Image (tube, rainbow, N blue to C red):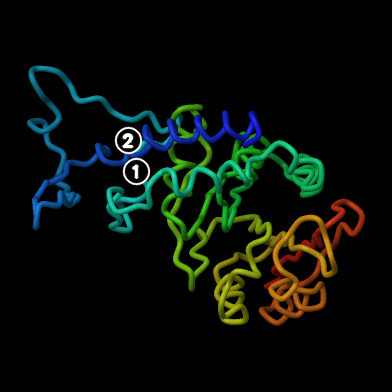
Amino acid sequence: MDPIMKTTCHLIVLASAIAAVACSKGSRSAATSHVGGASTLTATSAPRTAETAMSGGQHAAEHNPSQAPIDCPLRKPGLDPASLRPFKDTVQYIAFLERPDRASWQKPDAVVAALGLTGKETIADIGAGSGYFSFRLARAVPEGKVIALDVEPEMIRHIHHKTMTEAVRNVHATFAKPDDPGIPAETDLVFMCDVLHHVQDRPSWMGKLAAQMHTGARLALVEFKEGKLPEGPPEAVKLTRAQLVALATGAGLVLDSEKPDLLPYQTFLIFHKTR
C-alpha cells in the first residue's frame, strides 16, 4: 500500500474508533439490555428538570450551539452504532475518497468557487460520503451550514467524528433514506457529486427532491461523462448529459448554467426552482 494511503488508513481507523465511542455515549441517556449475550442500546429521553440537571453537586454541562454539534446523528433514526460494519471494512473506502491525487481532476476548490456562494447559504450535500465536499462547502459558508446526508451510517459516523475533533460547527451529519432526499425546507443549494447514478427510481426521487426545494433554491449536479476515462464508474451505470437534464427538468427544475470545461472527466450542471 502507498505510504500516504497507509498513514491515512491508520488515522481513519483511530478516528472511527473515537466516533463510535462518542455515538455510544451520546448526550442522551441509554438503557442497556442483554439479549442472547448481545448488548443492545436503547435510547431513552426524560424531561430535563432541576434535579436531573444536577449530578454529584455539580451542574450538568450544556452544549453551546455555536460549537460543533455533539448529538450522535445515528441515534435519532434509531440506528445502533454497535451494528455498523467493522472499521476495517470502511476505512479503505474513506481513504480512497480522500486520496490526494483525486484533487487533480475533481478540482474541489474550483467546483466550490464556481457555485458563487454568498457565505450564508444552507447547503444539502447529498451522498456526502467521507465529507470530501462537505467540509470545503462549510468553509465557503461561514454564516451558513452544510447538511451532510448519506445512506451509509458508517459515513455519517465518520463525518460526525470529524466535526467534533476539528470543531467544525456548521456541518451536520444526517442519515438519509435511499428513496427520499430528505433535505430541510430551508435548503438554498443541493449539491450532488457522483451520486445520482446510484439512485434506483430516479424520476420519483428527483420529483421528491424538487418538491422539497423552496422557490429559488438551486441544484448542482456533477456526474461522470461518457466514454473511456481513467476515473469513474462502469460505463453501464453512467448518466449522459441529456439524461441529467431530462431528469431535472422533468421534475420541474430549470437549467441555469453548466461548466463544460472545468472538470476533465465530469459533467457539471446547475439548475434552479422557479416556483
Q: Nearer the viewer, mark 1 or mark 2?
A: 2
Q: From what the image shows, is residue 218 above or below residue 13?
A: below
Query: With 146 as the anchor, is 107 left or right in this view?
Result: right
Q: Which residue is mark 2?
A: 22
Residue 259: x, y in percent?
87, 57
Residue 161: x, y in percent?
43, 36
Q: Total label count?
A: 2
Query: With 173 as the anchor, is 130 left or right in this view?
Result: right
Q: Which residue is mark 1?
A: 72
For image coordinates 38% across by 52% down, the residue present is 85
For image coordinates 81% across by 56% down, the residue present is 230
Q: Looking at the image, do the residues carrying marks 1 and 2 touch, with CB atoms under 8 Å apart?
A: yes
The quarter of the picture where the N terminus appears is top right
Mark 1, Cα crowd under 10 Å, few <14 / some 14-19 / many 20+, is many
Sooner in the amino-acid sequence: mark 1 or mark 2: 2
**Badge number at residue 204:** none
**Label 1 – label 2 distance at C-alpha:** 7 Å
What element does badge 2 sit on? helix
Q: From what the image shows, is residue 12 above or below residue 239?
A: above
Specify the amino acid type for callout 1: Cys
Residue 62: x, y in percent?
28, 28
Specify the amino acid type for callout 2: Ala
Residue 197: x, y in percent?
65, 70
Q: Nearer the viewer, residue 105 or 274?
A: 105
Q: Nearer the viewer, residue 274 or 70?
A: 70
